[in-house]
Amino acid sequence: MPIYSAAQQEIAEKISSHNVTLKNWRDWRWQLKHSIQDIDTVETLLGIRFDPKKRKALEMTVKKFPLSITPYYLSLINTDDHENDPVFKQAFPSARELEIEKHDMADPLSEDKDSPVPGVTHRYPDRVLLQVSNVCSMYCRHCTRKRKVGDRDSIPGREDILKGIDYVRQHPEIRDVLLSGGDPLMLSDDYLDWILTEVRRIPHVQVIRIGTRMPVVLPYRITPELVERLKKHQPLWLNTHFNHPREINASAKEALRLLADAGIPLGNQSVLLAGVNDCQRIMKSLVHKLVENRVRPYYLYQCDLAEGLSHFRTPVGKGIEIMESLRGHTSGFAVPTYVIDAPGGGGKIPMNPNYLISLSTNKVVLRNYEGVITTYQEPEKYESIFCNRKCDECHLDLKLEDSTECAAVGIERLLSDWDRTISLTPEDNDRMERRTHD
Ligand SMILES: *Cc1c(COP(=O)(O)O)cnc(C)c1O
């Protein structure tokens, strides 16, 4: 049975003077139409009042970083203690968003720089991010693309999207296409179906991914009709963004069930947020609820250096502490990879506690999650295979037609037998610069 809680009924009645039925409430378009975009309405609906001084600061914040909350997501807020509520903190502005710190950046991940055509970010060798929508049903206060939030002038049209898809078509190395935004599920079923069909028609695209927060902030968007459309474009993976166990209620579970039953693999990308989920017990409860609902915790992001997020940032040590509390203590598939998305566009860098204590030529000293120190004896005879990348002469079985040919890059290249590179040097290295002058 779908829920329609007392809090939800109360909000629905206040939003609309006529009778709001359960059917209205569960209609995603009704929810979008009644999204809350100003402080007054939040006060009315939650029955709270901000003091005048605080209000003024909030008004200024909303001018710079707009506000938008679905009635559904608002209904999850505990009005008895909204100040400490994890949903409130993610959805409602804080005057601290206006504190810009020295190291903050508008585009911390250099997504605009790594963009060969508008709406495409091509950072990694074999996959690209397509921004197919610039709007969301709820504006997360911790959005890394805060610079673009609410910028309705830059909503990509059919032409722009076709240009992005064309880019993918012309780059045979791209085997994985991520639809992102904004939220791709803000698009209509027909439009989304069209994009997916176009991308699917490209022979070298093996998988498509959708990144969406709809199961969290507007689970009613996941309709049986939408799922039927998505199903046609398998293999299709979907990643969502739960940050707190409180967000996983009956409605969210229903959305996840529809998707999982359609055979769509589900992942979750959380952001580590001060005052929301920077706690081992909250994180453990979150990952447990996720796997119970067939969602694999995928990434835990360190909060990045976008402007207006300083009050959400934790030290990296908090993330390591959380990882320490998960690995070994719970199911391996419930443990996400903790990453820092490198400022300047270096991509995601995994962060882990150290498990390797030491090593000699034949022994490795390790520690486990309990603090037990143990050793692993290396093999006495290992016939190392000299790799010259002539795979058709090698006795290991690799079906060349199934594999992609590419040159080793980065650290992989330093480790290879056949490439003579002995070091990687940043382009603007002063020491090297001196050599060329001397
Ligand atoms: C995160 C991201 C990807 C996907 O990375 P995975 O590690 O494969 O999930 C691709 N492109 C960009 C620009 C990204 O930020």
Image (cartoon, rainbow, N blue to C red):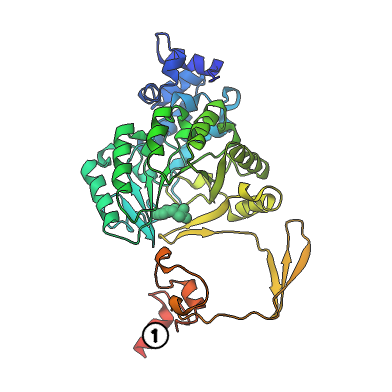
Which one is in front, 105 or 422? Answer: 422
**Residue 434 falls in image quadrant:** bottom left
Quarter of the image where the C terminus is located: bottom left
* x then y, percent, for residue 109: 41, 55
Residue 430 relative to residue 326: left or right: left
Name the residue beneath numbered marker 1: 434
Q: Residues within 10 Å of mark 1 (few under 14, many from 20)?
A: few
Which one is in front, 351 or 1? Answer: 1
The quadrant where ligand 1 appears is bottom left
Report whether residue 92 is seen.
no
Q: Is residue 46 above or below residue 142?
A: above
Residue at 36% from the left image edge and 24% from the top image edge: 29
Q: How many marks?
A: 1
Under circle 1, the secondary element is helix
Q: Is residue 170 above or below residue 149?
A: below
* x then y, percent, for residue 267: 51, 44
* x then y, percent, for residue 364: 71, 72
Report whether residue 221 is seen.
yes
Q: Residue furthest top?
A: 18
